[in-house]
Image: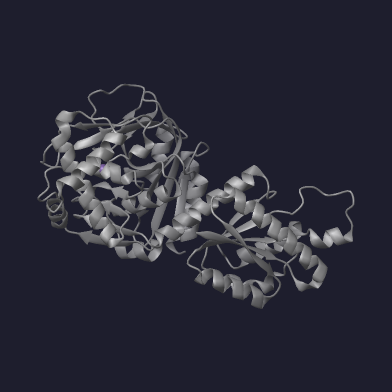
Amino acid sequence: MRFWFIVGSQLMYGEQTIKEVEANAIEMAKFLAAKLPFPLDYKGVVLSNEGAVKLIKEANFDGDCAGIVTFCHTFSPSKMWVNALGLLQKPWCHLHTQYNLEIPDSIDMDYMNLHQSAHGDREHGYIGSRMGLPRKVIAGHWKDESVLERLGKWQRACVGALFSRTLKVSRFGDNMREVAVTDGDKVGAQMKFGWQVNYVPVGALVETMASLTPGDVSAKIEEYREKYDFDGADLEAISYQAKEEIAIQSLLDQDGSLAFTNTFQDLYGLRQLPGLATQNLMSKGYGFGAEGDWKTAALTAIVKKMASDSSFMEDYTYDLKNGLSLGAHMLEVCPSIAAGRPKIEVRPLSIGNREPPARLIFEGKAGKALVLTLLDLGGRFRLITQDIQCVEPTQKMPQLPVARVMWKPLPSLEVGAECWIMAGGGHHTVLSYGLDAETARDWARALGLEVLHIGSQTTAQGFEREILWSETLWRNP
Ligand code: MN
């Protein structure tokens, strides 16, 4: 994945100015490329309508190009950009910067002709707004740490958007019976996000498991031994999870699928609901959604692509006295968010009518995090994000046999929950330590997706208004 750095100017200032623009731009691209998480390639100075159209067509066609960054070093008349921007199919970041940090005492008219982004970028901004084009605007000096950080986050969001377009989701079994929020329009999701969501029979999993050799299983057990603690007495149950994991991964890899779902209501021919198997697969970047929740499975895979310390999650129960939410799932929480070394335990599951499954048990890390959920509102999708502060659990909870995370939702448990519920947010989420709300918004913008954010400044009254405005817009985008 690469990014293109395109600099705006025009022929009016003469050859010498354009040469300087070019030299400055090359230096800037080189510096930025060394600091950013993904490469940024200098692609030239745009001087004409034809030049702009040619570059944008090339960017669209290049499968490796995840987005373009533009900067108008001098004034670059916007009518020159209209045809090109009308064709743009890649995410766009308008970097409003300036080659020099300060105004030199030697400033003269040559300097004024060269260092014009203060007004050149305003012309550039106007045409973006006039054409109603989604773009990220970042202002500040190009060497500034916060500019670099935000540009890097935007890059990660673009990579997430490009990844989304190629994502395949495998569904072992259907959606949990009667549940609304985890269901949705798969064709609509493919149109919006590019996801190919397909059904895989549970029988295929059972057959693949039966074809495995003892060597396959012992190699997987060795992998578990390196990463997790467990009791030798549980080896048989753990071996069963090892088989499930190998078989699930094999079927996913055959289809090029990087996310999957299953449901405890369709375990035909299986002795255990995949627990450890799912957790270990998630730690390798595979997305997962329980109870057939293919939207959250896809979202988990995408968020993990942007920030690996992320997991499928569910709001489970509250500590209302202390304003805390306890997040967990009956099995499937990713060990990438664990505070310490996880242990494998074999404990009964009160639903699903199968043998006690082996699962990883651990506590989540303390620290700032984000929860995200994706809803299908009928003909359109909505992303809701919320800032949370994960804390060390206030209790030991020795009888709770699942991985868990405790957090303080912002602005508070009550206001956060009121807002979340008013916006229609469900119980399944993706919890991420590495992704913040700005990056999630950049990702949503790149896909043309509605996003509502709940943070420290959110009030229930203001948020209710925001939902109304947002609905008015997104019902007829
Ligand atoms: Mn669930």
Q: Please state which of residues 33 and 454 is positioned toward the viewer in this rendering.
A: 33
Q: Is residue 138 left or right of residue 414?
A: right
Q: Please state which of residues 43 and 189 is positioned toward the viewer in this rendering.
A: 43
Q: How is the image coloured?
A: one colour
Q: Residue at x 54, y 52 (%)?
A: 154
Residue 347 in the image, given as x and y percentages of width and height: 17, 32
Q: In the displayed structure, would residue 23 be above or below residue 454? A: below
Q: Please state which of residues 296 and 308 is positioned toward the viewer in this rendering.
A: 308
Q: In the displayed structure, would residue 29 be above or below residue 233? A: below
The answer to which image quadrant residue 96 occupies is bottom right
In the rendered image, is residue 429 in sight?
Answer: yes
Q: Quadrant of ligand 1?
A: top left
Residue 392 in the image, given as x and y percentages of width and height: 39, 25
Residue 7 in the image, given as x and y percentages of width and height: 68, 64
Q: Please state which of residues 203 and 328 is positioned toward the viewer in this rendering.
A: 203
The answer to which image quadrant residue 132 occupies is bottom right
Q: In the displayed structure, would residue 319 be above or below residue 372? A: above
Q: Is residue 374 left or right of residue 54?
A: left
In the rendered image, is residue 88 in sight?
Answer: no
Residue 86 in the image, given as x and y percentages of width and height: 57, 72
Q: In the displayed structure, would residue 250 be above or below residue 340? A: below
Q: Residue furthest front?
A: 215
Q: Residue at x 59, y 70 (%)?
A: 85
